[in-house]
């Protein structure tokens, strides 16, 4: 993947700035501790489910490649609502409508190591590759309605047991990256800015989310 130095510099500059002014009356959205389960499942498990969701689409219909947020409701079910990052390095701005009561779960920046086609690779090897792709980040950013969150390095989720990328596919994978969970959502409008910088990938995403 090509590393975009301009985007990386912009994200680093944003990380160095003080938090933006919060909009009076804007709803707050608590950040859930990374060790706290969501709907009875660990956040490590939700990171696997996020990948299975993200990999379940063709490229042209994927929320990961969505330029404006029109695909944000695709494949969503249950108490957790996934937000998508981007393919490779990109700056992305999206709008999305989400039902009240959902918990948002999404990566600031992440990687997956997938078993090669027609070859077997051990789970230990997949986990090593995923870890090498996601070393300590240069920056991690999460801002909700002008409130900047800190301590995001603690939100790394690492695959302890490898997983199949789909129910009908025996291909094994391992994930590694930084994920956050926010919620549950109350009615209102939320503006989320998030992203991160790794040696081979940077990500900067803005979502405007309207909650009914």
Image (cartoon, rainbow, N blue to C red):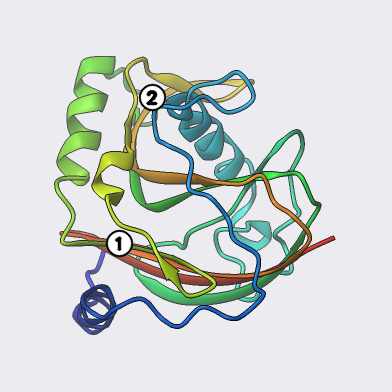
- Which residue is nearer to you in this view: 144 or 125? 144
- Residue 132 vs 151, above or below: the answer is above
For mark 1, give the secondary structure.
strand
**Cα separation between marks 2 and 1:** 33 Å
Quadrant where the N terminus is found in the figure = bottom left
Where's residue 118, x and y in %? 38, 24
For mark 2, give the secondary structure.
loop
The residue depicted at 71 percent of the width and 66 percent of the height is 96
Q: Is residue 80 left or right of residue 136?
A: right
Viewer can see residue 69: no
Front position among marks 2 and 1: 1
Residue 196 appears in which quarter of the rendering? bottom left
- Which residue is nearer to you in this view: 139 or 182? 182
- Residue 143 vs 168, above or below: the answer is below
Viewer can see residue 60: yes
Q: Is residue 5 left or right of residue 46?
A: left
The residue depicted at 48 percent of the width and 48 percent of the height is 31
- Residue 192 vs 172, above or below: the answer is below
Where's residue 42, x and y in %? 48, 22
Where's residue 190, x and y in %? 64, 68
Q: Which residue is mark 2?
A: 118
- Which residue is nearer to you in this view: 112 or 58? 112
Where's residue 67, x and y in %? 60, 75
- Which residue is nearer to you in this view: 93 or 127? 93
Q: Which residue is mark 1?
A: 196
Residue 142 appears in which quarter of the rendering? bottom left
């Amino acid at each position: 993947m090509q590393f975009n130095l301009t985007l990386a510099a912009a994200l680093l500059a944003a990380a160095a700035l003080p938090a933006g002014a919060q909009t009076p009356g804007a709803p707050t959205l608590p950040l859930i501790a990374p060790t706290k389960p969501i709907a009875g499942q660990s956040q490590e498990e939700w990171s696997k489910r996020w990948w299975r969701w993200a990999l379940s689409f063709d490229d042209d219909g994927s929320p990961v490649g969505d330029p404006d947020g029109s695909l944000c409701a695709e494949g969503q079910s249950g108490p957790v609502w996934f937000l998508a990052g981007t393919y490779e390095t990109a700056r992305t701005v999206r709008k999305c409508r989400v039902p009240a009561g959902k918990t948002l779960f999404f990566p600031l920046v992440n990687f997956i190591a997938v078993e090669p086609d027609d070859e077997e690779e051990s789970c230990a090897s997949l986990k090593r590759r995923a870890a090498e792709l996601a070393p300590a980040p240069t920056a991690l950013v999460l801002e909700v309605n002008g409130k900047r969150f800190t301590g995001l390095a603690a939100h790394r989720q690492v695959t302890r047991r490898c997983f199949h990328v789909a129910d009908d596919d025996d291909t094994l994978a391992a994930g590694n990256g930084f994920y956050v969970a926010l919620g549950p959502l109350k009615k209102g409008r939320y503006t989320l800015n998030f992203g991160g910088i790794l040696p081979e990938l940077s990500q900067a995403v803005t979502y405007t989310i309207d909650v009914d």
